[in-house]
């Protein structure tokens, strides 16, 4: 069972169909793409001596080559390690070291950043720039024979944001991703030749998973030439029929509110799948007015892609059904390929309408965290993935999120874990205590707020703390606001009360 069979099949069944576009320019058909995949796989085996099970990192922004590198890794029996290009170099270095990647592909914007860090991840033997003449020679190498893999063999090492200060690598097997791909056709939409998927979100993350069902269906991948710009998005929607895309709610909101949305021709658009963060009711209604009944919601985690629950396009399109307004604020019902329940602190299922932690099991759930048996055992205890999200399930199976027990902040669709930011701020000698929380933000969904208490006789400025963050973590993770208090509110056991800090922000807002 090797995911690369999807590419091989597409090249046989749809050889002349367009496979990849850069904006409106065709890059490769499936025959050509499959040939490049096999050539890259051959180079990985023969030139770089990579063996089945070795890891290959992708430090890449969205680019047409992303598709062929992913499938080349699988064709050669390797595990792909996509990395968020927005991460700080130190964060990229940690993932490279933790994964044990022997080779790293990098787009031009990241190759120069990674080169001077080689001493920090000495096991990486090569950093290969993507798109240059040397890369073209790799893709033209003699094609390799596809390596057979077991269903449980690792295919994608998905690094989550670090709830304990360091990210963890969720190991996704070939079976996990095959099952995810089939689930797309069951719960989201049919995909056929002539359809398109637009990658406006990062291909290293959620959008990358959508590559698979569209290869399986013989559809084409479309990579914008300008990143995310509403004008280009609407132009590509007009140009490519049957186009779908995944986007964070903040991106959907920006598209719906952009000047280009007025009078836009969205008749040939298939589906907008939103997820990764809560979408406020008014924003969702506005998007439905602009795009029509083309929206569907996905709720999932990197540990169980692509979905744990789905609020279908059909649901969005039927406002006359009972409890529509209430359920529009839910994350839908369990996806067809998984089992979901709500559990209490002793992992016992609770009754309908009762609060608890969301747990999921099924063939999309990761095999475990890479080289982290303790975290794996905790997350997968009893055979269920414990998501850390708190919610309720009604009598009809609709799940509503109530809180995030891990206190994750979701800004612009990206997860930011407070402890990761707190540990950086605590490095400053003047900082005695710090607590990071999220505050509602009309543009980004949430923004990061840091409450700081200084040590007696010490002081620090917001500018100094900002510089500390920028030197160690990604720019999008740093606090937007710093609040200085004499001390942080505590419980009777000395635990910082984030609820009191949230109340303070709410009271000031009122």
Image (cartoon, rainbow, N blue to C red):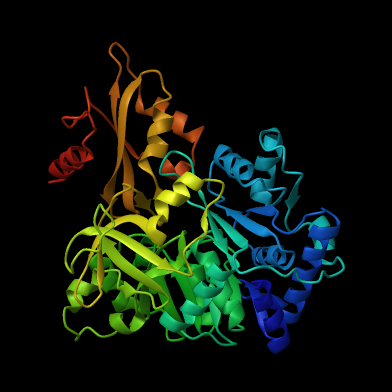
- Rendered residue at 35%/54% (across/down): 444
- Rendered residue at 72%/68% (across/down): 75
Horizontally, residue 352 falls left or right of residue 312, namely: left
In the picture shown, does residue 204 fall above or below 287? above
Q: State the image coordinates of residue 213 (x, y, percent, origin top left).
A: 55, 77
Seen from the viewer's position, the closer of residues 59 and 56 is: 56
In the picture shown, does residue 126 fall above or below 148? above
Q: State the image coordinates of residue 78 (x, y, percent, origin top left).
A: 70, 60
In the picture shown, does residue 267 fall above or below 81? below
Instruction: Classify residue 393 by image quadrant.
Output: bottom left
Q: State the image coordinates of residue 133 (x, y, percent, origin top left).
A: 82, 58
Instruction: Classify residue 208 by image quadrant.
Output: bottom right
In the picture shown, does residue 347 fall above or below 460? below
- Rendered residue at 85%/61% (across/down): 137
Seen from the viewer's position, the closer of residues 73 and 116 is: 73
Q: Quadrant of the N terminus?
A: bottom right
- Rendered residue at 48%/82% (across/down): 185
Seen from the viewer's position, the closer of residues 215 and 170 is: 170
Instruction: Classify residue 299 by image quadrant.
Output: bottom left
Seen from the viewer's position, the closer of residues 465 and 162 is: 162
Q: Is residue 300 visible from the viewing direction of this image?
A: yes
């Amino acid at each position: 069972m090797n995911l690369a069979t999807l590419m091989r099949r597409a090249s046989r069944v749809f050889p002349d169909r367009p496979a990849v576009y850069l904006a409106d320019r065709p890059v490769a058909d499936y025959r050509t793409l499959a040939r490049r995949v096999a050539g890259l796989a051959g180079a990985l085996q023969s030139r770089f001596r990579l063996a089945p099970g070795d890891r290959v990192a992708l430090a890449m922004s969205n680019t047409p080559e992303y598709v062929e590198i992913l499938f080349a890794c699988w064709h050669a029996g390797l595990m792909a390690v996509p990395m968020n290009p927005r991460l700080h170099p130190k964060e990229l270095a940690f993932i490279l070291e933790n994964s044990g990647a022997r080779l790293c592909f990098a787009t031009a914007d990241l190759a120069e950043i990674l080169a001077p860090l080689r001493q920090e991840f000495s096991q990486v033997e090569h950093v290969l720039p993507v798109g240059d003449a040397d890369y073209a020679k790799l893709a033209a190498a003699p094609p390799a024979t596809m390596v057979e893999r077991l269903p449980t063999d690792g295919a994608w090492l998905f690094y989550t944001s670090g709830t304990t200060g360091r990210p963890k690598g969720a190991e996704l097997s070939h079976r996990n991703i095959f099952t995810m791909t089939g689930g797309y056709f069951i719960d989201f939409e049919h995909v056929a030749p002539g359809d398109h998927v637009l990658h406006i979100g990062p291909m290293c993350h959620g959008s990358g998973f959508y590559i698979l069902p569209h290869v399986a269906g013989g559809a084409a991948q479309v990579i914008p030439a300008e990143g995310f710009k509403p004008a280009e998005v609407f132009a590509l929607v007009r140009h490519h029929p049957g186009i779908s895309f995944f986007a964070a709610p903040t991106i959907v909101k920006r598209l719906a509110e952009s000047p280009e949305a007025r009078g836009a021709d969205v008749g040939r658009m298939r589906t907008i799948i939103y997820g990764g963060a809560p979408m406020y009711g008014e924003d969702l209604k506005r998007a439905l007015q602009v795009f029509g009944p083309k929206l569907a919601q996905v709720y999932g985690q990197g540990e169980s892609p692509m979905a744990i629950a789905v609020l279908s396009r059909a649901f969005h399109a039927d406002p006359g059904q009972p409890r529509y307004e209430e359920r529009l604020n839910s994350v839908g019902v369990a996806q067809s390929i998984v089992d979901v329940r709500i559990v209490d602190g002793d992992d016992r299922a609770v009754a309908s309408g009762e609060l608890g932690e969301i747990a999921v099991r099924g063939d999309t759930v990761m095999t475990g965290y890479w080289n982290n048996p303790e975290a794996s055992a905790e997350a997968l205890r009893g055979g269920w993935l414990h998501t850390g999200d708190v919610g309720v399930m009604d009598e009809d199976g609709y799940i509503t999120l109530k809180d995030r027990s891990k206190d994750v902040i979701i800004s612009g669709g990206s997860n930011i874990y407070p402890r990761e930011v707190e540990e950086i701020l605590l490095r400053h000698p003047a900082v005695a205590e710090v607590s990071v929380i999220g505050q509602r933000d009309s543009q980004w969904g949430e923004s990061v707020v840091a409450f700081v208490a200084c040590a007696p006789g010490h002081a620090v400025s917001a500018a100094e703390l900002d510089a500390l963050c920028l030197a160690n973590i990604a720019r999008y993770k740093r606090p937007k606001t710093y609040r200085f208090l004499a001390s942080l509110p505590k419980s009777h056991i000395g635990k910082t009360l984030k609820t009191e800090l949230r109340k303070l922000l709410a009271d000031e807002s009122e």
